[in-house]
Image (cartoon, rainbow, N blue to C red):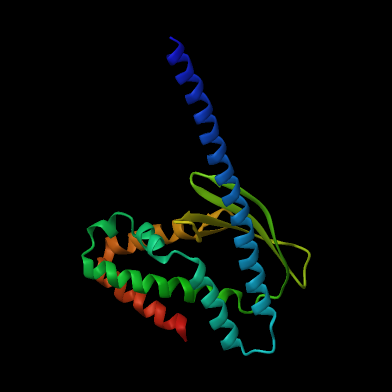
Amino acid sequence: MKKALLLAVFLLFANGFSSHDAFAEQKNYTEQSRKFVDDLGKRIIGIAADKKISEATRKTKIINEVDKVIDSDWLARFVLGKNYKNASDQQKSRFLTLYRQFMINTYGPKFKNYNGREFNVLSVNEQNGFYIAKCEFIPHDSDKSISVDFRVKEREGKLFVLDFVAEGVSLIETQRSEFNSTISQKGMDKFMDDLQVRVEELKK
């Protein structure tokens, strides 16, 4: 009886320490996510505001920043959904390459002429394994902020941006719907041929 009581007390404290450690780790990633997104936003604003470099250089630098923080492999699998599972190894390889180029060349250039004077991370909350950073961009010519949420995920100790949510619209949910609708109509190979054309246009 005494041994059973001691064991129960030990388990109670062990579970308490385990929960405390888990809470501390979650809080740590929440703060890391805040700094991660804040640094990214400020780097982008700094590059976009640098008028000493050419527009082409600003575009390249911002594309490189976006490329460093997104997990394009995870995103590629998510946006294809069941079509990724059904794709051949060759199709998967081609799509992973195409999608990375599509993402960085679509969303990187959007910031190159951004005339922001301030970027703020308003809050970060954990939600279903993701960290949602609610942010605002404030332009030079207006006091009206532009709201955007960054969805951040930790993987193997490193943070990645997995989604941008503007006005309640998720980037990757929109892409998932668009891509899978096109694949159901045209098939995987024709979809990727069309995506290749879009990527080449974006690079110009």
Give 149 or 179, whichever is nearer the viewer.
149
Q: Position of residue 130 (x, y in %)?
A: 51, 50
Q: Quadrant of residue 55?
A: bottom right
> In this view of the protein, can residue 118 be seen by the observer?
yes
Q: Quadrant of the N terminus?
A: top left
Q: Position of residue 67 (x, y in %)?
A: 49, 72
**Residue at the spot x=49%, y=24% of the render?**
10
Give 94 or 200, whichever is nearer the viewer.
94
Q: Is residue 126 above or below residue 157?
A: above
**Residue at the spot x=38%, y=64% of the render?**
73
* Figure disc tally: 0
Q: Position of residue 173 (x, y in %)?
A: 45, 56
Give 70 or 12, whichever is nearer the viewer.
12
Q: Is residue 57 above or below residue 104?
A: below
Q: Is residue 53 above or below residue 186?
A: below
> In this view of the protein, can residue 178 be seen by the observer?
no
Q: Residue furthest left?
A: 88
Would residue 93 appear left or right of 66 to someone viewing this image?
Answer: left
Would residue 101 appear left or right of 169 to someone viewing this image?
Answer: left
Q: Is residue 195 above or below residue 2?
A: below
**Residue at the spot x=60%, y=83% of the render?**
58
Would residue 97 appear left or right of 120 to someone viewing this image?
Answer: left
Give 200 or 39, whichever is nearer the viewer.
39
